[in-house]
Image (tube, rainbow, N blue to C red):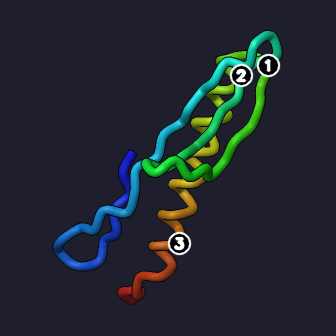
């Protein structure tokens, strides 16, 4: 998923994020939300893969929604 900055006509590429699921032997699944350089923005551990997938995608959605709200509040209002 790519985020773009809406400054002017040319959109500036901000980043790409992904959810990574990793099997942890008998103990469950680790999920991580990382950018393209490997920097972790969120991570966690769940017992089942569906639960890890859900929590990872939920964290990604929250991250993207916060970025959208931050950009929206920084934009000048058109009242």
Q: Which mark is residue 66?
A: none
Picture residue at 54% right of the left edge, 46% below the top = 34
Q: Which mark is residue 47?
A: 1
The residue nearer to you, when weighing 14 against 50, is 14
Picture residue at 51% right of the left edge, 78% below the top = 73
Outermost residue, top side: 26
**Considering only vertical position in the picture, is 27 above or below 41?**
above
Q: CA distance from mark 3 to mark 2?
A: 31 Å
Q: Earlier in the sequence, mark 2 or mark 1?
A: 2
Q: Earlier in the sequence, mark 3 or mark 2?
A: 2
- Left or right of 39 in this view: 17: left
Residue 61, position as x, y percentages in the image = 55, 46
Kindly identify which residue carries mark 2. Answer: 29
Q: What is the secondary structure assignment of the residue under circle 3? A: helix
Picture residue at 67% right of the left edge, 18% below the top = 23
Q: Which mark is residue 70?
A: 3
Q: Earlier in the sequence, mark 1 or mark 3?
A: 1
Check if mark 2's residue and mark 1's residue have beta carbons within 8 Å. yes
- Left or right of 35 in this view: 76: left
**Considering only vertical position in the picture, is 23 above or below 6?**
above
Crowding around mark 1 (Cα neighbors within 10 Å: few <14, some 14 to 19, many 20+) is some
Picture residue at 58% right of the left edge, 43% below the top = 33
Q: Nearer the viewer, mark 3 or mark 2?
A: 2
Residue 55, position as x, y percentages in the image = 67, 34
**Considering only vertical position in the picture, is 71 above or below 38?**
below
- Left or right of 1 in this view: 9: left
């Amino acid at each position: 998923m790519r985020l773009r900055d809406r400054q002017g006509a040319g959109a500036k590429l901000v980043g790409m994020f992904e959810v990574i699921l990793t099997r942890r032997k008998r103990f469950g699944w680790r999920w991580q939300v990382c950018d393209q350089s490997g920097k972790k923005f969120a991570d966690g551990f769940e017992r089942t893969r569906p639960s890890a997938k859900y929590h990872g995608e939920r964290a990604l959605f929250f991250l993207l929604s916060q970025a959208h709200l931050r950009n929206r509040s920084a934009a000048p209002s058109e009242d």
